[in-house]
């Protein structure tokens, strides 16, 4: 790159990566300025899957927006179900029965595990390993089967309701979940052997795309990407919602903030999610799964609320302003993917094209969530 | 017709045989690759066309032939058309000197291995032309990678083969096999075998060194813009090259056609030869579906800092031992 002023721009060319590209996982477009294979600047461009979810939310009654939430983040949809229903419950003061809270946590954590499994496969696919994705899909399939048995959908769940969940879980579901936890725990050592200890994998991801704690603070990076930098911040622990304080679990953290740490953090998080699910299954109480006096037509009193949950990708927030009518006056989403993507521009300076793919994979980008 | 010299007829027959062998082989290999990949990934692989999907590649080939070849705007059309041919033809021609058994060899050239290597190095030209003429930046990056990679890895490959050639004192493929009568060279030259095998993975652009067509980075690399049978020819060329690597490895390190004689088979030599070739090809497929892809600078470092020094030291030791 140090070629003197006269030849400064001779080798530099622009490459349009996306919106149709195998490793942008959707319709993200990145304008790259390249010198050979070294990246000079990388500028993400959004807007190819903008569906105006926020505006849609402001124009329809509260219950009808639940279906939109699972379309936002189709990889971990239960967590977004939780975000919206809990926010509306907070706004209108609906109490959720304890059994429903347990069911919510079980399904939400299953969704998180499913999201991490899919991420792991896709990340390794970006690195050129084709096989792991089929194994992780196989595991994820078991989760989808379980969740299908409770709510009928496999990807775009609309399971949560204001004041509970729409169906009670069956004994079969509990048994199946326990069997699945057992199965997945036998799979982790295999993944470690096949992937984590693979020397090519290690060389591809170690010390690549280091997010320093300072950088994470500036860009608002949250979720596993933040925890990989060594900051123990998890909404489930720091601003607990639902009944998370009742469970014992740890927040796995990395040290260096590189792609490898982000990988490790997610792998450890799956184990913690399994622990939460196990505890929830152990002490799930009997009772209704819907609040008795949950109103069918919601007219929350005028007011404002902000609610956050820990989604699979980080801190997801929802601002709701009610003017007393049956539609929100304002609905604003804070999605973790958007902030996590914004750090890419800084990470991409001076690295190779292959590393950009690794970094994008490790950030776990889900474009419809970023571009809501 | 009686005026045709017998040599001409022999060449005609053998070239027809070789071309059909390569085509058939590629078809079988595509099927094997998909089946092996399927079983590695815990799925059955192709199952629909024919019993256990054995006709799948035939149908795929027909589909590719039936497809229109699309020429993008502003391409260098002559080069765009030549590139797939250039990828396929040399790979086929090189089979002329491969000794499948003591009798089954089209021509036993005095410098057989030089002939093969010369033709194999045309492959990089095909990729470069494809990448350059496609008017696509991904293709161009793929081509650039391919040139750098192939030229770099040719050096350790030649060094490892040279160590064997020191011991045989002949470049003819047949005499190389015959020199291994007492002991296969994989026992005498294990380092050369490893270097050759790794380098040949890089030469044929197979994973974990498939950087010229790294689809998660470059969509499809140098053949992004190719469709129909033009793409099919690149594919056939790749499989022909894989078989070629298997054949060279077998000839140089695994004792060629030698093996215990089979009771009821006239051509047990050819059987053993093909068995060894397929074993090598199987390991290449196995690697592809197990490893992630290396990064470009790591690939180069590995070549210049590990493979070349090891190859040189191995060559020197071989020379010294032979002199003493």
Image (cartoon, coloured by chain):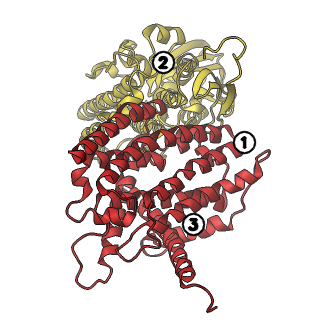
Disc 3 to disc 2, C-alpha distance: 51 Å
Q: Is the C terminus of chain B in the top left, top right, bottom left or bottom right quadrant?
A: top left
Work out whether residue B104 or residue A100 is closer to the camera in this orientation and state it.
Answer: B104
Give the SS element for disc 1.
Answer: loop
Location of mark 1 (residue): B135
Q: Colour of chain A?
A: yellow
Query: Where A60 falls versus A166 (above or below)?
Result: above
Residue farthest along the right direction in this orientation? B74
Relative to the observer, which residue lies in front, A121 or A339? A121
Q: Mark 1 packing: few (<14 Cα in 10 Å), some, or many (20+)?
A: some
Left or right of A60, for residue A219 = left
Residue topped by disc 3: B60
Contact check, label 1 and label 3, Cβ < 8 Å: no
Q: Chain of mark 3?
A: B
Pointer 1 chain = B
Residue under circle 2? A308
The dot on residue B81 is: none
The residue at the point 59 percent across, 16 percent down is: A301
Kindly indicate the quadrant of the structure image that contains residue A207: top left
Q: Alpha-carbon distance for marks 2 and 1?
A: 48 Å
Dot in front, 3 or 2: 3
What secondary structure is marked by label 3?
Answer: helix
Badges 1 and 3, same chain: yes
Q: Secondary structure at mark 2?
A: strand
Q: Nearer the viewer, mark 2 or mark 1?
A: 1
Q: Have a look at marks 3 and 2 and say if they share a chain.
A: no
């Amino acid at each position: 790159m140090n070629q003197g002023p006269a030849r400064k721009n001779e080798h530099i060319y622009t490459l349009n990566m996306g919106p149709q590209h195998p490793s942008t996982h959707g319709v993200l477009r990145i304008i790259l300025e390249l010198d050979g294979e070294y990246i000079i600047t990388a500028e993400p461009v959004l807007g190819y899957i903008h569906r105006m979810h926020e505006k849609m939310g402001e124009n329809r009654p509260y219950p009808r927006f639940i279906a939109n939430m699972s379309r936002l983040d189709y990889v971990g949809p239960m967590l977004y179900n939780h975000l919206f229903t809990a926010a509306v419950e907070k706004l209108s003061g609906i109490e959720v029965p304890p059994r429903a809270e347990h069911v919510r946590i079980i399904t939400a954590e299953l969704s998180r595990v499913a999201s991490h499994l899919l991420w792991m496969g896709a990340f390794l696919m970006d690195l050129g390993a084709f096989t792991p994705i089929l194994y992780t899909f196989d595991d994820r399939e078991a989760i989808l089967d379980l969740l299908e048995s409770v709510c009928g959908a496999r990807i775009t769940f609309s399971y949560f309701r204001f004041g509970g969940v729409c169906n009670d879980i069956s004994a079969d579901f509990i048994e199946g979940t326990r069997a699945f936890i057992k199965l997945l725990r036998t799979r982790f050592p295999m993944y470690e052997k096949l992937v984590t200890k693979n020397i090519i994998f290690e060389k591809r991801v170690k010390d690549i795309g280091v997010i320093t704690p300072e950088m994470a603070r500036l860009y608002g990076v949250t979720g596993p990407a933040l925890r990989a930098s060594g900051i123990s911040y998890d909404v489930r622990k720091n601003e607990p919602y639902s009944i998370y304080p009742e469970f014992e679990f740890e927040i796995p953290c990395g040290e260096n903030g590189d792609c490898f740490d982000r990988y490790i953090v997610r792998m450890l998080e799956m184990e913690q999610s399994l622990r939460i699910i196990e505890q929830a299954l152990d002490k799930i109480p009997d009772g209704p799964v819907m609040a008795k006096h949950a109103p069918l037509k919601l007219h929350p009193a005028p007011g404002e609320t902000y609610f956050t949950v820990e989604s699979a990708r980080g801190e997801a927030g929802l601002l709701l302003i009610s003017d007393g009518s049956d539609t929100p006056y304002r609905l604003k989403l804070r999605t973790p993917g958007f902030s996590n993507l914004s750090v890419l521009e800084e990470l991409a300076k001076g690295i190779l094209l292959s590393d950009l793919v690794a970094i994008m994979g490790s950030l776990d980008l889900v474009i419809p969530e970023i571009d809501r | 017709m009686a005026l045709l010299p017998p040599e001409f007829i022999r060449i005609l027959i053998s070239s027809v045989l070789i071309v059909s062998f390569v085509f058939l082989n590629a078809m079988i290999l595509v099927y094997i690759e998909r089946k092996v990949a399927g079983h590695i990934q815990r799925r059955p692989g192709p199952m629909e066309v024919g019993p256990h999907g054995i006709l799948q590649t035939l149908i795929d080939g027909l589909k590719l032939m039936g497809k229109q070849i699309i020429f993008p705007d502003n391409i260098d059309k002559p080069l765009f058309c030549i590139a797939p041919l250039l990828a396929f033809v040399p790979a086929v021609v090189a089979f002329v000197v491969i000794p499948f058994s003591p009798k089954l060899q089209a021509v036993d050239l005095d410098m057989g291995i030089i002939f093969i290597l010369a033709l194999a190095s045309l492959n990089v030209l095909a990729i470069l032309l494809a990448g350059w003429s496609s008017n696509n930046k991904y293709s161009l990056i793929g081509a650039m990678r391919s040139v750098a990679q192939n030229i770099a890895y040719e050096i350790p490959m030649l060094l490892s083969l040279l160590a064997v050639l020191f011991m045989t004192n002949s470049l003819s493929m047949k005499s190389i096999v015959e020199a291994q009568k007492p002991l296969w060279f994989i026992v005498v030259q294990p380092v050369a075998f490893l270097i050759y095998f790794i380098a040949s993975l890089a030469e044929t652009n197979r994973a974990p060194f498939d950087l010229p067509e790294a689809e998660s980075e470059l969509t499809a690399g140098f053949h992004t813009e190719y469709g129909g049978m033009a793409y099919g020819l690149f594919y056939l060329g790749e499989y022909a090259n894989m078989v070629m690597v298997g054949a060279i490895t077998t000839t140089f390190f695994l004792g060629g056609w030698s093996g215990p004689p089979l009771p009821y088979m006239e051509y047990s030599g050819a059987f053993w030869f093909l068995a060894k070739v397929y074993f090598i090809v199987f390991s290449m497929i196995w690697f592809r579906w197990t490893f992630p892809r290396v990064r470009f600078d790591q690939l180069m470092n590995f070549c210049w800092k590990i493979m070349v020094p090891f190859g040189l030291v191995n060559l020197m030791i071989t020379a010294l031992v032979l002199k003493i």
